[in-house]
Image (cartoon, helix red, strand yellow):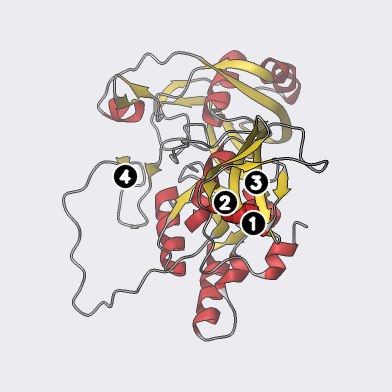
Amino acid sequence: MIVTTANSVIEPDIGDSEAPEKNISLDANRDPNSIRDENRPRSGKQPRPNNQMRRDKRDVHGWVILDKPIGMTSTQAVAVVKRLFTAKRAGHAGTLDPLASGGLPIALGEATKTVPFVMDGRKRYRFTVAWGEERDTDDTEGRATQTSDLRPSAEEIRALLPRFTGVIEQIPPQYSAIKVQGERAYDLARDGETVDLKPRPVEIHHLSLVEQLDSSHSVFEAECGKGTYVRALARDIGRLLGCFGHICALRRTLVGPFGEKDMILLEQLEALCDRAASGEGSLADALLPVETALDDIPALAVTRADAARLHRGQAVLLRGRDAPNSSGTVYVTVAGRLLALAEIGNGELIPKRVFNLTGLTASSARSNERV
């Protein structure tokens, strides 16, 4: 898939995985049913203890595909990874709800310029639906709004799934990041307002019933496009079955080009950090190269002379029998190293995003994994 990156803005998507973060505190004394918006501005910065040394930030470039644990928000996960690497810049490619586990792609340094390509990719989920209750958040955090004693059979469930495959109209959950007159829907919902959210087209590439755990719990797998809410899938299937339902477990197994084989547990990342601090390893071993986010985009190698022009923001004239005859977005390399994202058009190569990969990057072993 070719996507133009000129003037891209890096911000969280609002699809399911990109659900609003109903922040679950890691404090065991906090009420697990309470919901707080971590995106609200806070009053001032917390003072740094006098005995705490400030670590100098460094340039780190690449992707960490964190296997996010349950109970941690995406923002908390980014902060932890950024701290472990002492990185100057970090962001994530699509929010993963605190109650969910699985792949959270975290971009460090120049990788943040490739975030839109990951966010536009497919996502795959494995999720469990609890039948008999619909909740206002469409997951276990909310309060029950409708109940039923009915329980669906596997045959009844499978018969419905074709209605939720392909391009469908989906109404986002009340607790979603959709903006309504300048405010997030989840803020309005927390204030007790009922928001009239309009249906939106989303694409479900695949949806299947994997396992019937018991009469009240069914396990599904779904592969979907940007903007899809898995919580809304559970809600709508439950309504059609007449038994109601909500998500009680959710794991993301694929985000764009990143699958489970790319994921690293937080405990493993922390252990690698400890070994690196003692000189027994390198955090570069946890990084995937910046360009792994660009798997679906053609690569174009250029000479050092052309690379110098592109680095200065100047267009390069494409000529000769080896000149590409296509148009659109490419990623440009020089001597095997990522240089820029560029557009081919009217016989020219026009730079849109130039990369400066000076600093810590993926190790050669990780770089060769996808070759």
Eyeballing the image, is 110 above or below 158? Answer: below
Q: Can you tell which of label 1 and label 3 is closer to the viewer?
A: 1
Which of the labelled discs sits on residue 305, or is there none?
Answer: 1
Residue type (three-letter) at the residue carrying disc 1: Ala
Amino acid type for the residue under numbered disc 4? Glu
**Quarter location, residue 344:** top right
Q: Which residue is mark 3?
A: 331
> Mark 3 or mark 4, which has the lower sequence index?
4
Q: Which residue is mark 4?
A: 38
Decide: few, some or many residues near mark 2? Use Cα within 10 Å; few <14, some 14-19, many ≥20: few
Residue 3, how many percent across, how many down? 61, 33
Pointers 1 and 2 in contact (CB under 8 A)?
Answer: yes
Closest to the camera, between mark 2 and mark 3, is 2
Residue occupied by mark 2? 309
**Local crowd at mark 1 within 10 Å, few (<14), some, or many (≥20)?**
few
Per the model, the C-alpha gap separating discs 1 and 3 is 17 Å
Element under label 1? helix
Which residue is pictured at 69% across the width and 63% down the height?
367
Labels 4 & 2 near each other (Cβ < 8 A): no
Front: mark 3 or 4: 3
Secondary element under disc 3, as helix, strand or loop, is: strand
